[in-house]
Structures are given as structure tokens and as C-alpha cells.
Image: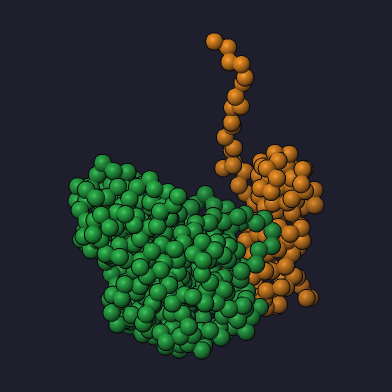
Amino acid sequence: MTENVFVISAAMIPFGKHRSSSYVGLGVSPLIDALQGAGIQKSDVDAVYVGHSYGGMMTGQRITKEIGLGTVPTVNVDNACSSGATAMHEAWTAINQGLIDVAVVIGVEKLTQFGGGALPLSPEDREVKQGLIMPAVYAMRATRYLYESEATVEDLARVSVKARRHGALNPFAQFRKEVTVEEVLAARPVADPLTLLMCCPTGDGAAVVVLASERARARLGAPNGMRVAASVLHSGQVEEGFRDMTKPEISYQSARDAYAQAGIGPEDLDMIELHDAFSIAELVYYEAFGLTEKHSAVALLRDGRTTFGGDVVVNPSGGLLAKGHPVGASGVAQIAEAFWQLTDQAGARQIEDARWALTHVTGGGTAGLDHGACTIHIFEAA
Amino acid sequence: MTPSTEVPVSAPIADLETDSLLGTFPEGPRLVGTECGQCGRTMIGTRVVCSSCVSREVSRVALPSTGVLYSFTRLHVGVEGVRPIGYIDLDDDVRTLADLREGDTPLQPGIPVVLGVEGDQWFFAPVAGE
């Protein structure tokens, strides 16, 4: 017998360069606000799951001790960009299996500690030793995608334009200024064909959600929130030879399993928060999630079918490109966005009658793998 | 007390001593690969176990010096000037990341490329005359 799991609260700080804040300084406020939003006490919490990649030892405990939330298990999780969503998956598993009733999930990251530039990857990795950085991985994906399909570099720019237009509506976004296709194309080159405005920014952030079982939700008189309809975590599988970089299998397989678990299909979704770390990713993931056939994503983008008023709003928050991407925080921030959309609290960017949401983060640049991790969640308004 | 069975003592792998991708072979300088004696899979670099069949019967081999450029980018950050890099699918279906040299043939996915070595630096460049 498995339990239904609900997200009953969400809180986050606006993503940005918060140079005066430590991991603790980033995480404490949304933790307090999320508990308050759920209408519960810290003594109601059965376990805490914390996603981060660069926080160092005991990041979770350093945050929770500030409000005297101790004794219960605190689990620190690293899965690169998927860290926060992996923490969510672990929390969901524990409640779903009936082991606990109430969990707090924290995603937190401070990238300004590195002073800018591409994300530091593991120096033990073979390709990292050769000088590989994440922008190069996505740039090669983009080069190949443009070579194989009808997509153009202007389409890559259109992804950024849409992200910024959405982010302009989101008070939690790092970038709230709109840009044009011309500005994106004229921006500083990072890794051809990607310009700076086709890459997510570095920044700091924290997001927190509270999960509860159905019986705990009733016992605590908590808000209905949204139901977790699917929680899927996949790891990359090594490929020593040819790999189709335009068809990242880890996201295809995770989406397939998430739809099966939720009992819905892509046509049912009202919104998606996907891992647009670089603009090419959005096109590739339209295809991975079954919104369209392989190599035909640009038609959806050009026709406005993935923005407000379209079939499914992709990255209403502005996504990683505009909202920002403090690695370990992103997965939880996506879930916060889904929560606000499905509980009609998204303000200027509210999607009308939103019922179904999908969130997706991959993680990691590792030689031989498509990505190291991929987490997909599907939520239904409750 | 005498144990009835002996447990295996797992040994650490000295992979930090063998991480250079360029090696010397009878045919000249080549990228180092590892071939599995059980399933025949060839892999980039020095390995002690096959990632397909988990056999430890593996041996060091020279990888082909020719292949096809799968994709590439020119990096403008983290380097002096511009650095072209790409993924090469070598002729034995092993993919490697590599520095690229630009020549008369413009870089493009699908073009044939060949290994070049200068000192301990190695790179791939478009095959001349293609």
C-alpha cells in the first residue's frame, strides 16, 4: 500500500547574486516561510532532505539548526543540477512508502563563491581534464542539432527571448529584462553557436517545499496543495561509442516512466518547467517529452505553442535562462513554480485553470554519460 | 578461529598513474584504448574492467588514428583566444573528445578527421584533400 503525497507549501528567495549571504543566509528565510505557509510547526517535521552540490559538509544541518529543527533525520543530497529534485524524490519515496508523514525539502546553492565563469566540474573526470565545460557540451549538442534539423541559430535565440519574456513577469527571476533576437545573437560568444544570452547565469538561491501524506495533511489542517503524481529519478548509462546528442536518452526514458506513473500523456500538461541550462536544451526536451517528433521542436516555438496562450506553457517562471540556475536549488524552485501555478498563486504569470505540471532537471557533465542524473516530477492540482 | 571461507581483498586501482590518453605503439603515437578479451568492446583510455560485460580480461590497444567529426564547438571562454574542440567517432566506434585544428576544410559534423601529434600535444584535423 503506497501513500498519496502532497506538496502543501513552497517558498523561495529571488535568485540572484546574493554576495552577502552564506548557504545558511540563503536557506533560512524560505525554510521559515514554507513551514508557515503549510501552517505547521517544526515539531511536525519527520525528516529534512537537502539538495546542494557545493555547500560543503552538513549544509542541511547548518541551515535547520538556525531554527532549532533537529533530532529528525537530515539527508544531504548531491546530484549536481538534479540535487534539489533528487532530495524531493527521496522525500517523496519516504512518504509514499509510509515511513514518514511530513518532510521538508530544501534546495540551496551559492555559485557566487566561485567568482563567475562556467560551473566547476569534477577534476577527476577524463573529459574535464581535457578542458570540457558544460557550455561546450550543450554547444556541441546545438551544432549537431542545427546540422540535422531545420532549426537555425535564430531559433536558439528565440528560446532565450521567450525565457526572458516569462522571467519579466516573475518577481523571483534573476533577469527581469526582456531581450530581442538581435540582442541575443549579438551577445558575447561563449561556445559557438551559443552566445552569453543563450546560457543560464550563475547566481545564488534557495527554495523550500513541504510534503505531507494525505492523513498528515488532514490531521494538520494543511492546505490541499498539489498531488505528486509521479516522481522519477534516472542515472546516465555509459556509452563508449556513438551517442546521439540530439536525443538525450536519460530524459526520454525518465519522461516515459513519469507519464506511466502519472497515468497521463504530454497532451494533458498545462505547464512544464524544464532544464533549459542552455537554449538548445529546450528544443531537445520538447521532443524528449513527446510534445512533438524528433527534429521538429522549432515549429512549436515559432508558433507560440509553448508560451502563455499556447498548448502548454514551457518555463512560465523564465526557466534557468531567466530565473537563474543556482544548481542545487533549481529542482526545488521548479516545484515551487508548479505549486504556485496549480494553486492559483502565480500572479502576473498565472496559467489559467492549470491542472497538470511537469518539472525536469538533469545533472552533471561526466565522460561517456548523456547526463549523470535526471529527475522528473508530475503534479496534479488537488 | 579459522574462517571457513576466504573473502576477496578488493584492490584499489592506480588510475591516477595511467590517465594519459596518448601512448607510443609500434605504429606510432596513438590514443590509448582498452579492448575487452571477453566481449570485444573497445573503450577510450586505460581501464581495468570492461564497462559492458564487467570482465577484467582487458588489454591495452592503439586506437585508430582516423574517424569522423560528430560535432564541435569553438570555445571563447576559459581559454586564450578561441579553442575548437569536438567529439570524434573513431573507426572502431569509440568516441573521444579532442582538440581540433582548423585547416582548409571548414569544420562541420560528418567530415573525416585524422590524429595529429606535436610533442606531447595531440589533436584531430580535417583529412587533407577531402
Pick the front one: A179 or B105: A179
Residue A146 in view in this figure: no
Number of numbered discs present?
Answer: 0
Image side of residue A105 versus residue A297, left or right = left
| Residue A325 to residue A143: above or below | above
Tell me the quadrant of the picture where the N terminus of chain B can be found.
top right
| Residue A67 to residue A335: above or below | above
Q: Please name the color used to draw chain B.
A: orange
Image side of residue B35 versus residue A234, left or right = right
Image side of residue A142 versus residue A28, left or right = right
The residue at 69%/69% (across/down) is B69
Residue B65 screen position, x and y as percent: 75, 59
| Residue A336 to residue A218: above or below | below
* Quarter where residue A39 is shown: bottom left
The residue at 33%/80% (across/down) is A350
Residue A332 screen position, x and y as percent: 36, 62
The residue at 25%/54% (across/down) is A219
Pick the front one: A165 or A69: A69
Pick the front one: B91 or A161: A161
Residue B74 screen position, x and y as percent: 56, 72
Residue A337 screen position, x and y as percent: 35, 70
Q: Please name the color used to draw chain A.
A: green
How did the renderer colour the structure?
by chain
Most distant residue in the top direction: B1
The residue at 60%/55% (across/down) is A237
